Image (spheres, rainbow, N blue to C red):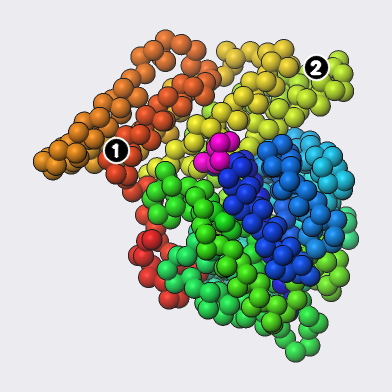
Amino acid sequence: MKYIVIFHANLNYAYLTPDKYEFVIRKSYELILDTMTTRFPDTKYVFEASGYTLEQISIITPDVLGKLKTAVDSGQCEFMGSPYAHPMLPNFPEEDGVWSIRFSNEIYEKYLGLTPSSFWNPECGWRSYVPKQVAETGYTNLIGDFEAYSRSRTPGGTPNRPEIFKEEYTDDQTFYDFSFKYDLQGSEKTIHFPFENVGGVPKGSLRLFLRTDRVAQFAVRYFMGMPGYTFEAYMDLIKKFSQQKADEPEGALIIYADDAEYVGTNGWFRLKYQNKPDHVFEQTPESREKLVRLVEACKKIGEFITFDEACGKLPAIRDTIYFDDDSAWHGAKASTWASTPMAKLLRPWQDLVREKLKEIEAELSGELVHKIWYHLTNSYNSDGQWPPTLPEAPHIIHPENYRYCFENLLTAEMLVGGVDRSRLPSEAVQTMNSILKMQQDLIVGKANRLLISKQDGDVKNARLALDLISRSQAIQLLEKMDQKILYPAQYAARAYALMEARRLVGGIPIEKIVETGITDNLDASENV
């Protein structure tokens, strides 16, 4: 069996603030590049970065850009492309996504001297036009998600995989769902070979290879040291899904296709799986040895190849592959990213700016049109509006991520000459409250419990926490101002007060962690 590793680098990541960009580049991206170059110079791998991420690497750490370029030029590393500011392509018009991909291509040509062949589709989000966007912008290979495929239907309504669909399909709008109820055979050919025909584009114009959370999510937990996700269990899983039928040619398996930040830092793993939102993007010193151990073990049983080689050289599955519109990876829906409070607040404003642009586009210079599209599509960045705020997961959007979307959108509005904001719904204050209130209530509840603890330090912290929450909830001044848009400073002042209050009370439970389906030997109630 041949193996593929894809490191997805994204400096537009939720809760990753600009002051930590160099830290993450050094501790994660550079670590990966150095490890593969020095320990495994003959081993191929894939490194993917958005145009924004690559541009930031070039500005902040030009030496790391040089290392990446050397690895790409040598043929050891395949560089994979994606939209410029990590938007969810299915959640915006087709034309807008094409612009975002082209903005990335401009950066790749500028700093790497190439246009990639392979495309990373953020969150594997799907709409019928996504493959057309990818093919139109010069790509020939596309990554897809096995779970989304196996739970989707053909245009005629017949499930792609009836036996899996029956067990795992749901109409529920879920955040993430790793409940793999169907016992997938290790010899599953659709995770070993590319599809040569993708629904929505001419036959043979685009090849698609599937990753699976059954392996990729285990990989993340292995790097994070989550109980039960041991190296031995990871290798057993890789060996299981390396099985092939006797009459089949050799195929390939993607053993890692997730955030590069999880190799070298903890990403936002502590936020989601340990209820520690103030401990994200911290260094994980054991990551290098874990990567070395993984690559060494896989080299003993197979060969590493690039994604482009897997798509172009392996025998292809001739069946046409289809995905349901609105599907995405991790069992989520693409529209989940468009349904957060902040996404709903920004979208009417984005639509007004887009409408104005289309009205006057023919009158503008090409350079100005290019700049307007750049800022408008940057405001579509998914992590600036993520994660969702739900009763069972009362997350808040980080102020820095929201600021990126807001400032790009404000710039786009200025460049089109302004829009009629009276057409916007007056929901700025309500949106802010809906995002902050759930955590505020949890903090108040814990602070009140600490007040009766009789511990002087706890009582002092609890009183300050209550004061901070009380003042951050006062919105009289905001109600007298323009409520059509939510300025970043207005949101940040209250969000940072919440974060400080949360720290003072020693944290609160943000998510109830229930693990099912990824490993049999992990206690479903276990939380790191």
Of mark 1 and mark 2, the one earlier in the sequence is: 2
Instruction: Quickly name the residue at label 2.
Output: 360
Q: How crowded is mark 1: few (under 14 residues within 10 Å), some or many (20 or more)?
A: many
Could you tell whether 173 is left or right of 118 in the image?
left
Q: Position of residue 267 (x, y in %)?
A: 53, 51
Q: Is residue 61 magenta?
A: no
- In the rendered image, which quarter is residue 317 located in? bottom right
Residue at horizontal 52 percent and vertical 77 percent from the top: 233
Disc 2 marks a residue whose amino acid type is Ile
Image quarter in which the N terminus is found = bottom right
Cα separation between marks 1 and 2: 52 Å
Please state if 170 lies on the left or on the right of 455 as rendered. right
The residue that appears at 42% across and 10% down in the rendered structure is 480
Measuring from the top left, give residue 337's x and y in whole percent.
57, 43
Quadrant, the C terminus: bottom left
Q: Which stretch appears magenta?
A: 15-20
- Up-down: is 481 above or below 19? above
* Along the viewing direction, whichever of 239 and 99 lies nearer the viewer: 239
Tell me residue 148's x, y (percent). Answer: 63, 60
Residue type at mark 1 is: Leu
Let me know if residue 82 appears in the view: no
Q: What residue did someone put label 1 on? A: 504
Circle nearer the viewer, 1 or 2? 1
Q: Residue drawn 65% across and 52% down?
A: 29
Q: Measuring from the top left, give residue 199's x and y in whole percent.
A: 79, 57
Residue 351 image label = none
Extreme-bottom residue of the structure: 246
Q: Does the magenta stretch include residue 18?
A: yes
